[in-house]
Image: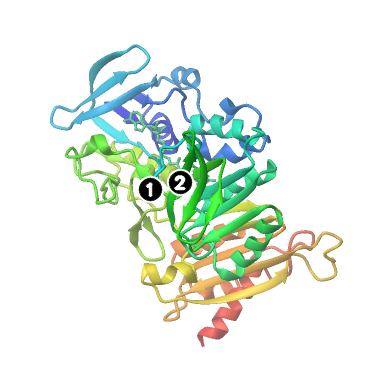
């Protein structure tokens, strides 16, 4: 069997690893159009803040390492056409300046996405950047230490935008964080949490400008100078666009079925409209556990699970993609938060009726004071009022208690109810937590509300 894998990020990497683990005799050709294999955008903030020094170490595979495992690795080689009938792909070798066709038995596409560029006047000015991949990482790093960059505007107050804002605020820049949505991290956290984080941002030189629509970028001598919204104008020596992504699927139009957003249509087994072509990662939708509908949730975790499952299914395993809950975590200066599933803020859009309980507690028992290292913790549990099924949760603290959210993710996937969590067995150690884990406490409150 000859398998061609396109794209070397999370989805492509995990597909290749999965094939090597279970079918090492396979002939694998692995293509990456960029000049670097498997850059880890998730690690970009650590590099930009100087925690990780070498940009090339922000990766999980090297061409030499993968070749020694028997994989034919092609970097700077782009797949520009697919012919499903002939079972061939067209390859442009950007390094050698040559072109060729390659045949396959199975093709796995993990072509991912690029930062979306806002379709407004001035979007092509100099110093309007994106934040994804190694090339942008290197350019952004240079701007963190550029003395002429004083004002930074980040567009998009989701995960990536908040990471970008924090990087530049820590680098001493004044940052404006614009979003069309009414709150920062609106899709990840409810108001109780974003209010805390908004004041934490303002204390640290990030000024949220939410509920605003970007109208144009104003330039001077070809360089961006300010960003105009429907409510104001913000000075900008650098703009970072983090308001959504666009799938790299233009070359697949009329080859396999795409949806209106250019995402590749796949079934539960990650198979596209052509039976020998599979697709994974940010260019696809994933099954969202709380609603059992397919959603766009661009996370490495999802791409990795899909890659592993695609690697089985191309050999006939017929394993459906596991449902996911969009679990994610992030730090905003002193705070760490994580969330999963449905929030009050996303419930209407998802068409789900919800009820929630909010618990404010301390991580350790009260006999450990805040001065002695205890920390406050906020936890919100969201459930279905009809039957108490767990639908989502959010947690925030100055202590890293984010891993609690993984329990809720599993509870959602396993269709557990708040009554299942109320007395569930979780450890107690006063150095770490309280006799009743905060999940127990919230679930007990929810169970009373349900009665
Ligand atoms: P991509 O990462 O988009 O990669 C696709 C690859 O395919 C690219 O290298 C591209 O050059 C190549 N390619 C595309 N078309 C072709 C072609 N025709 N021929 C050859 N090669 C091609 N997720 C998390 O779970 N946790 C995090 O902490 C997290 N942090 C993030 C931080 C940042 C700043 C960003 C930008 C993303 C973060 N994500 C995180 C999301 C995560 O990076 C993506 O979900 C993941 O990278 C998706 O992987 P993918 O394989 O679909 O595609």
The residue that appears at 45% across and 73% down in the rendered structure is: 389
- In the picture of the structure, the residue carrying the numbered disc 2 is 217
Q: Is 40 on the left or on the right of 321, as rendered?
A: right
Q: Quadrant of residue 257?
A: top left
- The front one of 410 and 403 is 403
Secondary structure at badge 1 equals loop
Contact between labelled residues 2 and 1, with CB atoms less than 8 Å apart: yes
Tell me residue 95's x, y (percent): 38, 14
Secondary structure at badge 2 equals strand
Of labels 1 and 2, earlier in sequence is 1
Structural distance between the alpha carbons of marks 1 and 2 = 7 Å
Outermost bottom residue: 451
Q: Is 440 on the left or on the right of 224, as rendered?
A: right
Label 2 lies in ligand 1 vicinity (Cβ under 8 Å): no
Tell me residue 102's x, y (percent): 24, 20
- The front one of 181 and 352 is 181
- The front one of 289 and 94 is 94
Tell me residue 430's x, y (percent): 79, 63
The residue that appears at 41% across and 19% down in the rendered structure is: 70
Where 112 sits versus 294, above or below? above
- In the picture of the structure, the residue carrying the numbered disc 1 is 120
Q: Is 94 on the left or on the right of 86, as rendered?
A: right
């Amino acid at each position: 069997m000859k398998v061609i894998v396109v794209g070397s990020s999370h989805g492509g990497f995990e597909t290749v690893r999965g094939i090597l683990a279970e079918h090492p005799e396979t002939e694998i050709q692995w293509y990456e159009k960029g000049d670097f294999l498997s850059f880890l955008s998730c690690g970009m903030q650590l590099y930009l803040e100087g925690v990780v020094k070498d940009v090339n170490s922000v990766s999980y595979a090297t061409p030499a390492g993968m070749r020694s495992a028997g994989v034919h690795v092609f970097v700077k080689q782009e797949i520009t056409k697919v012919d499903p009938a002939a079972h061939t792909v067209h390859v442009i070798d950007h390094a050698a300046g040559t072109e060729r066709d390659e045949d396959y038995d199975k093709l796995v596409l993990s072509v991912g996405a690029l930062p979306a560029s806002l379709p407004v006047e001035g979007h092509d000015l100099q110093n309007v950047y994106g934040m994804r991949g190694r090339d942008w990482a290197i350019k952004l790093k240079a701007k963190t230490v550029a003395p002429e960059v004083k004002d930074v505007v980040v567009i998009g107050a989701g995960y990536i935008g908040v990471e970008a804002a924090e990087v530049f605020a820590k680098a001493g820049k004044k940052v404006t964080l614009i979003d069309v949505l009414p709150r920062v991290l609106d899709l990840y956290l409810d108001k109780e949490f974003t209010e805390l984080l908004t004041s934490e941002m303002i204390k640290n030189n990030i000024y949220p400008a939410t509920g605003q629509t970007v109208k144009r970028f104003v330039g001077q001598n070809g360089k961006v100078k300010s960003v105009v919204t429907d409510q104001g104008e913000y000075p900008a020596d650098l703009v970072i666009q983090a308001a959504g992504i666009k799938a790299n699927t233009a070359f697949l139009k009329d080859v396999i079925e795409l949806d209106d957003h250019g995402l590749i249509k796949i079934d539960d087994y990650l198979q596209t409209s052509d039976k020998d072509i599979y697709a994974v990662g940010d260019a696809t939708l994933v099954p969202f556990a709380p609603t059992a509908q397919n959603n766009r949730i661009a996370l490495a975790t999802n791409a990795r699970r899909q890659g592993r499952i695609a690697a089985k299914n191309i050999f006939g395993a017929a394993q459906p993609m596991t449902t996911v809950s969009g679990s994610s975590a992030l730090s905003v200066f002193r705070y760490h938060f994580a969330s999963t599933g449905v929030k009050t803020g996303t419930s209407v859009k998802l068409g789900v009726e919800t009820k929630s309980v909010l618990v404010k507690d301390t991580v350790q028992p009260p006999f450990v004071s805040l001065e002695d290292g205890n920390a406050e913790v906020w936890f919100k549990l969201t459930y279905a009022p009809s039957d108490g099924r767990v639908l989502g949760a959010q947690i925030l603290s100055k202590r890293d208690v984010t891993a609690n959210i993984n329990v809720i993710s599993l509870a959602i996937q396993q269709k557990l109810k708040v009554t299942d969590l109320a007395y569930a067995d979780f450890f107690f150690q006063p150095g770490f937590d309280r006799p009743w884990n905060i999940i127990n406490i919230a679930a007990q409150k929810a169970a009373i509300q349900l009665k």
